[in-house]
Each structure stands twice: as structure tokens, then as C-alpha cells.
Image: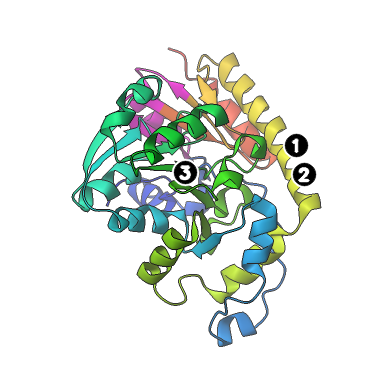
Amino acid sequence: MLEHGGRLARAAAASGTPIEDWLDLSTGVSPYAWPIPEIPARCWTRLPEEDDGLIEAASVYYGAHDLLAVDGSQCAIQLLPKLREPGRVGVLSPTYAEHAHAWRQWGHEVAELDADGAEEQLDSLNVLVAVNPNNPTGDCRTRDDLLRWHEALWARGGWLVVDEAFMDATPQLSVIAETHRSGLIVLRSFGKFFGCPGARLGFVAAERDVLQRLRELAGPWPVSGAARWIGRLALADFAWHETACALLASKSQALSALLQNHGLPPLHGTALFQWTKTEQAERLYTHFAEQRILLRLYTQPRSLRFGLPGTPDEWRRLEEALKYVLP
């Protein structure tokens, strides 16, 4: 399997330190989680049921009519390549590596493309995958760009797959409401914005034929009853959404300023992380690990992704570690 953030237990074990001593900034998950109430026992003692109101709540929240709940958006990333005959797939890169990996696994030819040159390649592609906002770089393509690309692809029977895992705090940039258009598929993640990655809940928005084929591949009960119950309530909590969007925007700006002030200016970011390129990425990753702070390290290009600290003490810990970054 590919490397991912969040492997805090491994980092703690490698250093011989308690996991409780670590600050995990490697995942891009909100540290300000939706407050989960006590989960009813029936969520554990009965099989999940699809007519529980989850899809209706998700439809209102996302502004999309046809949706499928899946075991995290990672599930959809792995299943989508099975729905097409092997072809040529473009993936805007650098980005979340699971996309290219999944398409290659099922026999597709994958071309990792620079976003600025992607439009010139559309005639040679059967599928284009765009993570928007991008992970890890944080840059974002416009709705007009994406819908123009979709139109060009669908004219030849192609797909545009847009992974909007980090879109919740900027819903005005989303194309999910346009997924009534054939050949446009949007993936959404519940865990990142709501701070509940352990729920393993995600959604696919697409035309009904695509969703039905995905449903058959996913099999019965792909999402637990507890995750469905949490998701339904959280997606309907619009007062919390508004507060969370404002809080995350403020904290992300504060993180950008903090990194800038200590010689690591971010190139881009989202409401949930900041991304900085530096030839010293490996050295700095080790430096922060020595301070029991886990970051996300990338080698192509050399860069670091910083998630948001949560508590005032966590912010102080990060600032203290940053004081010793510059040689």
C-alpha cells in the first residue's frame, strides 16, 4: 500500500515515546470535530438500513440529487477504475497518489499531467482526474475550467472525476451540483471537514447508472450504522457548518502567517492545511519529529504539508519548534 499521513503509532514506536506525547499534523483533518453525541445501541445491534435519512441529508448539504454513500471516498477511488475498459487516464499531479495507483492497478495507462497543460491533452484522454482543492498543494481549479474540461471529455464518451475531499469550507467552488451531467463524477469526504475520519464515510455524486454500478461493486452495507447515524445528524447541522467554516478559515490564515514568519512560506493552502516547498523537507521533517510533531513529507517535489493545530498548547508547540527551523 502507498504511504499516508496519520501513522502516529508507528512514529511513536520508532522513537520509543508514548503516542500521547505526539502532535499529529500529518492528516489534513480538522482538529475541531463536530461534537458526536452518544451513539444509540441500535447502530451496533442492527444491520444498517438505507432509508435512514442519510442520503436525503447529504443531498441537501451537497446540493446534489443523486448520491451514493461509501466507506470513505477512498472506496470510490478504488472502485471507479473497474467501471471502464482500460484506456488513457490523466491525473493532475502532484496529487493524492491513490488515484493514479488505482487506475494503473486495473490496466489503465496513466499520464500524470501538469494542471496548466491538461487542456491540451484532453483529446487523448478517456478520463481526467482532478483533486480540487488539490492535495497536497492546495491550489484550486475554477468551476469554468472543470466544466469546460468535462464538456470536451464527454463529447468523446469520457469522464471527468473531481475529488473534492477538501472542498467543504469553500462550497462555492464545488461542481457537485452539476453531476446531473453525464460523465461528471464528484467524490466527497465526510471525515476531513467534520473531524471524524474514523467514521469512514464518503459520497459519490454522479448519474444514476454510474452509482448503480458502483453500488453493486461496493456490496451490501458498505457503511456502518454508526457512521450513517453520525453523518445524517452532522450534515444537517447547518449552524455548526457556518461556525466551522469561519473558524477553519481564520486558523488556516494564522498557520500560513506563522510559517511565513519562520521562513517556510506556503505556496498554497486550504482551510485544513498549508503546503510549503523546500529542498530541506527531509531535514525539517526529522527536526519536527524530534519535537514529537508529525508532518506529511513529500519527496516529489520536496515539500511539507502542515495540518492545523487544535488547542492553544498545540499552537505553542508548533511555534516553538519553528523557532529552530532556519539554519
Q: What residue lies at 74% left-to-right and 48% top-to-bottom?
A: 241
Residue 303 visible? The answer is: yes
Q: Residue furthest right?
A: 239
Q: Is residue 3 left or right of residue 75?
A: left
Q: Residues within 10 Å of mark 2 (few under 14, many from 20)?
A: few
What type is the residue that disc 2 sits on? Glu
Write the residue at 31% across / 35% down: 90
Check disc 2 and report its element: helix, strand or loop: helix
Magenta span contains residue 168: no
Q: Which residue is mark 3?
A: 163
In this picture, residue 276 sits left or right of residue 320: left
Instruction: Name the disc covering residue 98, or none.
Output: none
Q: Secondary structure at mark 1?
A: helix
User: Which range of residues does the magenta coloring cover?
Assistant: 276-303
Kind of residue at badge 1: Ala
| x then y, percent, for residue 155 | 38, 38
Check disc 1 and report the residue beneath it.
Answer: 246
Per the model, the C-alpha gap separating discs 3 and 1 is 23 Å
- The answer to whether the residues at label 2 and label 1 have Cβ atoms under 8 Å apart is yes
Q: Residue at x 57, y 87 (%)?
A: 45
